[in-house]
Image (spheres, rainbow, N blue to C red):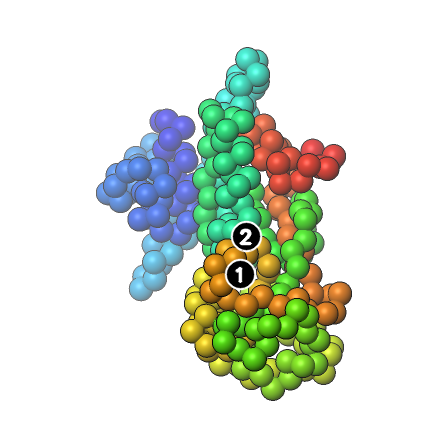
């Protein structure tokens, strides 16, 4: 039995998908199935049950024990690799990072490039997802780090705060507000808006701030990612409130008008999250330090 087989098993449980587990381990779906059968034959126990009519897989009682202990073995193996690299002062390996689109597309790339230039033997594997899934993947061990907006305290998670982003109003260059330098929230009442979907933290924060200022906007459309929102605003669907780093390029190119919001509460906190019960790899620690130069608690 190889370490790789344990990893395939754990990835299958974490991802709930034979195809995704195969993709993550650069093998075929049939190879994933064969490795699971090999494990079950070796231990003479059924480890997984397929849920009829659904894609998910479910752990049996034996499977739960095997999954837990396999995770321990994989953690120990990672620690071994880190220790051996540490003997020669080499930082390597792959750091799996899950992040939301607005942060991952517009704020992390310069940090990833800086990290790769400093530590060429290491790699950052970025995945883009919604906040709820980022948190889930960190907790189940699918990724080592998560980077999210409005990080919420949660049992089992450590949060390292990064620099916050300013939220701004965007509209098409032809909009009547386009030439304004600053605008108050109350002036947005009744206006057409393109919004994030309701379960996205930035939307929740935006709704809260607007409500506290007695503002009710007209929802024209809802989208789950920043790029679609920007394109909708650009063609005149309405206005939107977004983090400033995500629209710097469009402001420079004249594609969008960016207006400051007068109230001080228009701020979006950003943070790195990781499991509290696990020690970060040396490469992960170095990456977090790049994201927060004042980090002192690792």
Q: Residue 251 carries which label?
A: 1
> How many dots with numbers?
2
User: Mark 1: which secondary structure?
Assistant: helix
Q: Does 163 appear above or below 219?
A: above
For residue 88, side relative to residue 52 (left or right): right
Q: Does 116 appear above or below 181?
A: above
Q: Does 40 appear above or below 93?
A: below
Residue 6 image offset from top left, x and y in percent? 41, 34
Look at 28% across and 38% down and name the residue there.
27
Q: Which mark is residue 68?
A: none
Q: Name the residue under label 2.
A: 103
Residue 188 image offset from top left, x and y in percent? 64, 80
Assess disc 2: are there few (<14), some (14-19) or many (≥20) residues with their C-alpha within 10 Å of its C-alpha: many
| Screen quadrant of the C terminus | top right
For residue 178, side relative to residue 6 (left or right): right
Residue 151 image offset from top left, x and y in percent? 65, 55
Look at 36% across and 41% down and name the residue there.
24
Residue 135 image offset from top left, x and y in percent? 56, 52
* Disc 2 to disc 1, C-alpha distance: 18 Å
Is residue 241 shown to the viewer in this render? no
Q: Which of 222 and 232 is in front in this view?
A: 232
| Screen quadrant of the N terminus | top left
Q: Nearer the viewer, residue 97 or 66?
A: 97
User: Mark 2: which secondary structure?
Assistant: helix
């Amino acid at each position: 039995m190889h370490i790789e087989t344990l990893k395939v098993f754990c990835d299958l449980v974490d991802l709930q998908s034979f195809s995704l587990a195969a993709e993550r381990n650069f093998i075929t779906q049939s190879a994933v199935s064969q490795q699971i059968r090999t494990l079950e034959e070796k231990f003479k126990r059924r480890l997984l049950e397929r849920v009829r009519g659904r894609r998910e897989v479910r752990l049996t009682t034996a499977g739960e024990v095997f999954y837990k202990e396999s995770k321990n073995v994989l953690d120990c193996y990672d620690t071994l690799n880190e220790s051996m690299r540490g003997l020669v002062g080499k930082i390597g390996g792959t750091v799996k990072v899950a992040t939301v689109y607005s942060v991952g597309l517009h704020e992390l790339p310069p940090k990833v490039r800086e990290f790769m230039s400093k530590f060429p033997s290491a790699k950052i594997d970025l995945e883009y997802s919604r906040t709820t899934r980022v948190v889930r993947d960190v907790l189940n061990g699918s990724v080592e780090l998560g980077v999210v907006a409005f990080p919420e305290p949660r049992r089992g998670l450590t949060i390292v705060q990064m620099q916050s982003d300013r939220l701004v109003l965007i509209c098409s260059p032809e909009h009547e507000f386009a030439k304004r330098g600053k605008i108050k929230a109350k002036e947005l009442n009744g206006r057409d808006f393109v919004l994030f979907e309701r379960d996205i933290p930035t939307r929740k924060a935006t709704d809260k701030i607007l409500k506290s200022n007695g503002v009710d906007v007209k929802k024209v459309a809802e989208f789950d990612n920043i790029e679609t929102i920007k394109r909708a605003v650009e063609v005149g669907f309405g206005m939107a409130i977004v983090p400033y780093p995500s629209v710097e390029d469009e402001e420079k190119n004249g594609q969008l008008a960016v207006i400051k919001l007068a109230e001080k509460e228009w701020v979006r906190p950003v943070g790195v999250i990781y499991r509290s019960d696990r020690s970060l790899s040396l490469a992960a620690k170095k990456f977090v330090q790049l994201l927060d130069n004042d980090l002192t608690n690792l």
